[in-house]
Amino acid sequence: MINKTYNVLKNMFVLDSHCDTPSQIFRLRDIGLDNAHAHVDLPKMKAGGVDGSFFALFVPSYMAPDTATRYALELLALVHDSIDANPDKARMAVSVQEALEIQSQGLVSIFIGMENGSPIQKSLPLLRLFHRMGVRYITLCHNGDNALCDAASQGTTWHGLSPFGREAVHEMNRIGMMVDIAHASDETFWDCIECSKAPIVSTHSCCRALAGHRRNLTDDMIKALADKGGVIQINFYPLFLSDEFSEVLDKSGMDPRAEEIETDFRADPADPAKRAAWYAVQDELLTLPRPGVATIVDHIDHAVKVGGIDHVGIGSDFDGINVTPDGLENISMIGKIFDEMRRRGYGEDEIAKVAGGNFLRVLDEVANIAVSMR
Ligand SMILES: [Zn+2]
């Protein structure tokens, strides 16, 4: 439930660059309500002073191409339905200008991202169509190699971008679609650095120097991302934040069970028993000792030190993670991060950059580069 613990800053656009809330809408969440167990819904965003959020159309790697396309379309349709049902709270945005207008009306901006490029199959027309329908970034892959590139958790098919992946990155540059390398293998990352004409982003990753997960970015990667004008958006997933937590989770044996229960629930979201089981296992995961707000800010600090204050932001991964940081159990509490940054000596302008300014800058720049390429 909503937990508002800080003062909303003025002159700041708070933007979360990645949440998996569409997957929860698919599981029958009404985002107009303050839902128990939800990481993100409109009342919690409002309470947290969140001005905008990228809702990711997450498509699991196991889906066959046509199924993946259909599923992405259904998630997109559900997001549109949810926004239509809440005209007093939210509007869809595709540009910085729109988002600022929406903010001035006191409403929340919902941007659309796509997590996993599999729904575009091997079709540039489909890529363009998703852009026309409002998608503004594509996370090239999820936890499996696909037609575009290799993933961090596999990385055996192409050794980076596929030939089609290179074409797709070029087309994304040309139409103004951000290239998101969260989940990509290191080789894919370096291929994108080399071949993208626009800045690239990681919408939800942490620093590998602080936690060794292969999904996290090394210092060299953070530096290259920054040199190209992009941003690393720090993820809240305890497993990416802390090696210590990774050990705790392993020892608990809860993760495989939680995944099984979630798969069961995803297949049958209307079944109240399956929903109850999923809530119960999440509550159980919350009993583990977890990293908190300070650890998130440690990652922000590190990324700022390596890449600079203009190249770091926040991508919660909320509603896509089965366990949350201690004290940051949903989006209404996001301001604790800014309070901790303030405590560590960051100025208000610097906090505003990390809170959303940097990601909006890149969104705008990618759109401008597309115009210049026409
Ligand atoms: Zn993800």
Image (cartoon, rainbow, N blue to C red):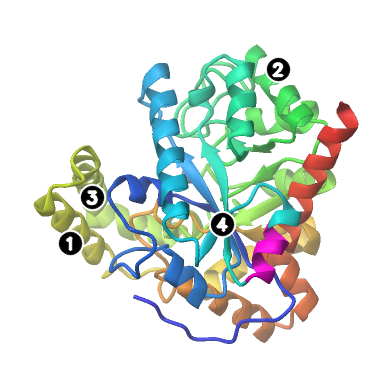
Element on which disc 4 rests:
strand
Which residue, as the protein is rendered here, is positioned at the far right? 372
Q: Are marks 3 and 2 in contact (CB under 8 Å)?
A: no
Measured as percent of width and height from the top left, residue 85 is found at: 41, 56
Q: Are marks 2 and 1 in contact (CB under 8 Å)?
A: no
Measured as percent of width and height from the top left, residue 323 is found at: 35, 60
Of the residues shown, which amino acid type is indicated by label 1? Ala
Measured as percent of width and height from the top left, residue 278 is found at: 20, 54
Q: Residue at x 40, y 44 (%)?
A: 78
Tag in front: 3 or 1: 1
Of the residues shown, which amino acid type is indicated by label 2? Glu
Measured as percent of width and height from the top left, residue 140 is found at: 58, 31
| Chain part drawn in magenta | 99-105
Residue topped by disc 1: 280
Majority secondary structure of the magenta segment?
Answer: helix
Of the residues shown, which amino acid type is indicated by label 3? Ala
Residue topped by disc 4: 91
Residue topped by disc 2: 167
The label on residue 258 is 3
Q: Residue at x 24, y 46 (%)?
A: 262
Element on which disc 2 rests:
helix
What is the distance, in whole Å, between disc 4 and disc 2 at their CAs?
32 Å
Of the residues shown, which amino acid type is indicated by label 4? Arg
